[in-house]
Image (tube, rainbow, N blue to C red):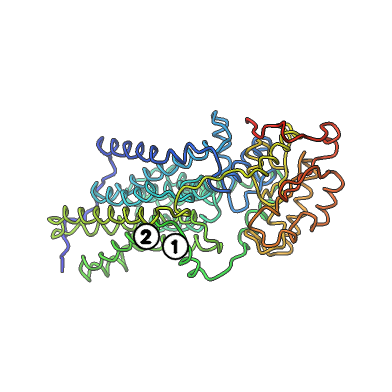
Amino acid sequence: MITKNKSSVKTKNYAGLSPQEYTTLVFFSILYTIKKLPFILYNGQINPDESQMLTQAITLKFDPIFWRSVDGTTSGPINSYIILLLKYAGLPFNYLTLHATATGLVIFSLFITYLTLRLFNTIKVSFLSIIIIYSFFFFTNHNDFNHYNSELPSFFLITLAIYILAYTYHNKKIPIYLYILFSIICCLIPFAKLQGGPLAILYLLYEFFIILKRKLNKTAAIVGLGSGMVIVGGSLLAYLFYNNIIYDFYIMYIKTNLNHYNVGDPFSLFIKLIFKSSYDYLFFLIYNIIIWSTFPIVISKKNYSYLIYKDNVFIFLSINIVVSYIVVTRTGYTFEHYLFYTLFPITLLTSHMLSHIFEYRDIKKYTFPIVSIMMTGLFIGLVTVHILKYNRKNQNFKRFELAQHEINVIKLINYYTKPTDCLVVWGWNLTYHTLTGLRQGTRENHSIRCMTTNSLGAIHDPYLIEYYCHQYVNDIKRNRPAVFIDEVKMNSIFKDPNLVAHQTIPDLRNTIMTNYTLIDQQAGVLVYVRKDILKIRGKLNLGLQKYGRNF
């Protein structure tokens, strides 16, 4: 049995990066960007979530009050405001902006995670840990791990929060502003994605635990944490009350999401998600589990018992992984991009274990062979995964091409609208918004929350369905969209489209019948135009109109 080198227990500060490290990080960032160019330079939808958030940003440009003009459903306001801010910075409202942003968020998250690892570890351990997750991001071509999604901004905030958490754990004298900043970041995580809330709570609790263990600055630290919460909470309440949307916020973001329909037990959903996801993720998980499995073999039983029962960092990192998987499976859906929440918790635990392994004197003389074996195993695994992925459509980058009926519908929309008009799509096809540049005329741009159906996203609460139907109709009356489209017959998520057509909701049917005229039907997609606009514009000959609009 290997004995532990007692002298290695001392805490060392590895936080200062060398010029060589910065050069290496920049090199790998550039290499990553080059590898992702097929995604970055594709000006089209990789995932429907991209169109949702892009549409919301377009809408917020006209009315910047979230929950008054936009309901992000499970996505928080931060995701859409990021896109809006990029527009004000001079970038266009298109998919290129989203894909470049997604790539940038991953790169910065990796960089911050490396800084976190270096607070406690040597270059060797930090590099070994980061190269594993870097390899996953670098080689995966799975759409869900490359598109702009609502997990990415919260994912970035989480890595930032963990870095500050590690910094406060590692250092004795912490300025109060750092506690305030940490608290603000944690409080912002749920407003990027409500799903990340439990992780934010975990980090705040662990920070509180760290403070209680300190002999100095307890009061100042607690005041700092409380101040951050007050700043975010107070700002939110002021924003909601001033804009008279506090009830809408409660219903749309809190109550509906907490009562979201969940099917199946979490464990079976977890297994299904793991084996349904990308082969790259499956290998990433297995590779890390192998490292974890070797850990109790390498260290002595006494030290292993100490680690799992008394090492609060190990306990925290283990809980972090458990909570991340609970967060992933809570909704009952098997969306692969939910797994973003598990990536860095896994990496942090692996790094912690590797640091303990390499602390042993008897291990040091085997450092080179161990690292060589790890890198060889990683290389063989990546090659194997690449072979298995070959010609598997769900494992590789897939472009979404417009169907002819969608092109025709876009021609009709462009003919009957001007850039300041709004559009309503019943049935969830937000490319009509993104390719015409038209804002949404209803807050709920999916329309699924208005439906009594077993389709994806349904909420199964009669009161909430009635609330959303009433809101949907009122938004149409308030915003007077130029065009109304019923898309349900062409949307594969509805088992029986006839049960969810807009005519099944009396108030909506009457509003459309009174104010709109059906002017065309394209492959089951119904296109209605407001009557006063139709009188002015008349009928369109589809062969004379281009379908794009610059915006």
Locate residue 179, reporting x and y percent: 44, 47
Residue under the image location 62 percent in, 62 percent down = 260
Q: In the image shown, does 52 or 306 lie closer to the viewer?
A: 52
Q: Are marks 2 and 1 in contact (CB under 8 Å)?
A: yes
Residue under the image location 81 percent in, 32 percent down = 537
Locate residue 309, reporting x and y percent: 32, 68
Q: Earlier in the sequence, mark 2 or mark 1?
A: 1
Locate residue 486, reporting x and y percent: 74, 49
Q: Amino acid at mark 1?
A: Ile
Residue under the image location 52 percent in, 47 percent down = 149
**Tag 1: Cα neighbours inside 10 Å, few (<14), some, or many (≥20)?**
some
Element carrying mark 2: helix
Locate residue 158, reporting x and y percent: 45, 50
Among the 4 quarters of the image, the one containing residue 283: bottom left
Residue under the image location 58 percent in, 36 percent down = 84
Element carrying mark 1: helix
Q: Which residue is mark 2?
A: 285
Q: Is residue 312 visible?
A: yes
Q: Please tell me the numbered disc located at residue 274.
A: 1
| Left or right side of 272 for 509 | right
Up the image or down, 514 lies above or below 385; here it is: above
